[in-house]
Amino acid sequence: MDKRLKDIQQGTLTESRLNSDFLFWLKEKGPNWLLAILLGLCAVLGWNWFDQRQKAARDTAWSELAEASSPQALLDIADRHQAVDAISALAMLEAADRYMESVRSGKRFDRDAGAPDVAMTPELRAQYLDESDRLYAAVAERLDAHPAPETLVIASAWFGRAAVAESKGDAKTAESHLKSAQAAAKTFYPAVASAADERIATLASLTNRPPLPSRPKAIVPIAPTPTDLMQVPTGEVTASEIDALTGQAPATPAPEAPAQPK
């Protein structure tokens, strides 16, 4: 009995000592640990909020890029989303393509199909070519130092500049741009580099085109004179000949009246 009581007393003292040590630790270091735990939770929550916001911004940027149609809208997207993936470069590339599509089709992108001024003028065509070349050059220069993911965009920009030069009839500049596209794509996209090489081989057609034949002069027929239309035949014309010309049946002569007896 004494032994059991002694064990109970020792256990009680041990528990009391543990409780006292825990309370002392909690009093001395508990607030610091609690603060560290709270800061860790705040950091996790903050990172989750930031990640969700980045994803939402990325989704918004891609959605706006897919819905934009005019070059001005695309350039606005490029300005607003410069830090989101490659949205800015892709928007500028798409805007330049819009200008080139108008040049190829001969119709303005900012007019309806039935508008009286939908056709491209020579001045507007030159303006569109210059603007598209400027945008293609901006994309190529911006991404020129970037690694593989953007090299395809760089090659596309150089292809666009080559198309502008071809539209202007400048085969030498077009060849230079195609070589730049080939250099940008050869490491990661050899098929694109081969396409650039094939296109270089076709540039000779820009300088070796046969001259267009001159337009033949229109042959204006000489109108016949009234004298030519009405040739008066010489000699006497009988009544049967007149009927044959007019398509009428010959007139039947009236029967002679019988002679009256005297």
Image: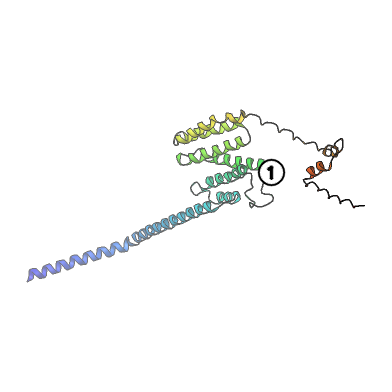
Q: Amino acid at mark 1?
A: Thr
Mark 1 crowd level (few <14, some 14–19, many ≥20, 10 Å Cα): some
The residue closer to the viewer here, 85 or 240, is: 240
Q: Position of residue 249 (x, y in %)?
A: 77, 47
Q: Position of residue 33 (x, y in %)?
A: 34, 59
The quadrant in which residue 105 appears is: top right
The residue closer to the viewer here, 42 or 91, is: 91
Q: Which residue is at 69% across, 43% downward?
A: 121
Q: Position of residue 97 (x, y in %)?
A: 57, 44
Q: Quadrant of the N terminus?
A: bottom left
Secondary element at tag 1: loop
Q: Which residue is at 28% across, 65% downward?
A: 23
Looking at the image, the residue that sits furthest to the left is 1
Q: Position of residue 251 (x, y in %)?
A: 81, 48
Q: Which residue is mark 1?
A: 121
- Looking at the picture, does residue 70 appear above or below residue 12? above
The quadrant in which residue 52 appears is: bottom left
The residue closer to the viewer here, 126 or 111, is: 111
Q: Is 180 left or right of 234, judged from the image as shown?
A: left
What coloring was used for the rendering? rainbow
Q: Is 186 left or right of 230, judged from the image as shown?
A: left
How many labels were placed on the picture? 1
Looking at the image, the residue that sits furthest to the front is 262
Q: Is 250 left or right of 206, judged from the image as shown?
A: right
The residue closer to the viewer here, 82 or 217, is: 217
